[in-house]
Structures are given as structure tokens and as C-alpha cells.
Amino acid sequence: MRVLVVDDSATHRLLLASALRDRPETREVETAASGEEALRRLVATTFDLVCLDIEMPGMDGFAVLRWIMARRPIPVLVVSDRRHDRTALTALELGAFEVLGKPSPRAGSLVDWKKQLADIVREVSSIRVDLLAER
């Protein structure tokens, strides 16, 4: 599986990319620090999954998600601190596959977060992308 991680925070981008590289299903992980950079990569390369932050300066995650669903429907995992408010519901309405909170620095929570991420990655590998295009 080829994954694109989009987040303006270098810390979160590296943490998510590292966790994805640990997964046997993931053969390649690329990163983008902005919505604009994400679109350039999406035009140039085919990905199986996009992990997308919503709150970014410039082009936000909602705009990127709309573009993906309109032009290149693929599974999108939104990774956001705001997964318990309207942000998560809006992302799902726009076509996101799932919404996952960002990892917490509390002891033990990183292990739990990585398990949730692993479960989502396994699930993504069974998605029929052709059905996404019909939405």
C-alpha cells in the first residue's frame, strides 16, 4: 500500500509516517506539509490511502478532501485533534473513510493509537476503490 501523509506539523507528520512504515501492508509512505503540496503529489503519483489533517494554513484538509473525492476517489483517513466535534462529521460527509484523533503524549496512549491506526490500515486494504468513484 502506498500512503500519503498530509499535515502541517512536522512532529505529527513524522510520527504518523513512522507508524505507517511499521505496518507490513505499507510499502511506501510519502509526506506533504500543506494542502497545495498534497495536490501536487496526488497529481503525480497514485496512492492507496491519504492520511489528512484538517486544520492547515492555506488550503485546508476539507478542500483537499473535496478535490480527492471529485477527481481521484481513494480512501482518506482524517487525523485530527478535533475528531469529537462537527469537524469529524463534516469530513465523513465529504467522503472520508474514517476519522482518527492525533496521538496523545500520555503514557500508553501512543500504543493504543498505533493499534487503532493498524486496524484502520488493514480495513483500507479491503476497500473497493471503484465503489468510491460511484459516490
Image (cartoon, helix red, strand yellow):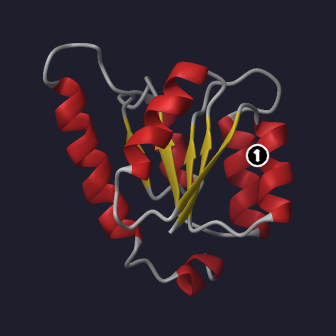
- Residue at the spot 35% in from the left edge and 50% down from the top edge: 22
Residue 69, percent across and down?
Answer: 68, 63
Residue 80, percent across and down?
Answer: 47, 30
Q: What is the tally of numbered marks visible in this picture? A: 1
In the image, taking residue 110 as reference, residue 30 lies left or right, namely right
Mark 1 residue element: helix
Residue 107, percent across and down?
Answer: 15, 16
Location of residue 2 by image quarter:
bottom right
- Residue at the spot 48% in from the left edge and 83% down from the top edge: 128
Q: Quadrant of the C terminus?
A: bottom right
Q: Amino acid at mark 1?
A: Ala
In the image, taking residue 7 as reference, residue 111 lies left or right, namely left
Q: Which residue is most to the top?
A: 106
Q: Is residue 48 above or below residue 112?
A: below
Q: Is residue 97 above or below residue 101?
A: below
Q: Is residue 72 above or below residue 109?
A: below
- Residue at the spot 40% in from the left edge and 74% down from the top edge: 125
- Residue at the spot 36% in from the left edge and 32% down from the top edge: 101
Q: Which residue is most to the left?
A: 108
Q: Is residue 70 above or below residue 59?
A: below
Circle 1 residues within 10 Å: few <14, some 14–19, many ≥20: many
Residue placed most toward the observer, 96 or 109: 109
Residue placed most toward the observer, 128 or 86: 128
Residue 20, percent across and down?
Answer: 42, 49
Please name the residue that numbered disc 1 is placed on.
38
In the image, taking residue 76 as reference, residue 118 lies left or right, namely left
Residue placed most toward the observer, 91 or 11: 11
